[in-house]
Image (cartoon, rainbow, N blue to C red):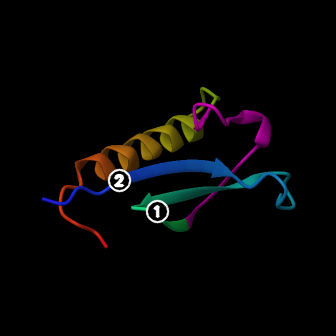
Amino acid sequence: METNRCTVRVFIRGFRLNKDGRAPVLLRLTVNGKRWDSALKVAINPDDWDPIKEKATGEDSFSNLLNETIDSLNLKTRQLKSPIL
């Protein structure tokens, strides 16, 4: 049985701030060396982002919802067992 190496990275594009000073949040899925980037269609203040943990640092409802979404995406990726590509 072939195993797939799959990683999920979440990061902000800090050099591309919108007019409110927020950076877009992006998701990068890598499967067997092939990358796929997607915007999560949310933006966050760069000061409220922890690049090491790849999560929002705030305690407000937006940060909590964003962190739950990131955790859910990571869990769904780990549960994939069939070949994707």
Q: Residue 64: image x %, image y %?
A: 51, 35
* Depth order, front residue of 60/56: 56
Q: What is the magenta range?
A: 38-56
Q: Amino acid at mark 2?
A: Arg
- Left or right, 66 with respect to 47, comes to left
Q: Amino acid at mark 1?
A: Gly
Could you say whether the residue bearing mark 1 is in a helix, strand or loop?
Answer: loop
Residue at (67% x, 37% y) in the render:
51
- Are the two marked residues, 2 and 1, in contact with CB atoms closer than 8 angstroms? yes
Label 1 neighbour load within 10 Å: few <14, some 14-19, many 20+ = few
Q: What residue did someone put label 2 on? A: 5
- The mark nearer the N terminus, 2 or 1, is 2
Q: To which residue does mark 1 refer?
A: 33
In the drawing, does residue 60 fall left or right of residue 44?
A: left
Quadrant in which the N terminus appears:
bottom left
Q: Residue at x 56, y 49 (%)?
A: 10
The disc at residue 70 is none
* Dot 2: element: loop
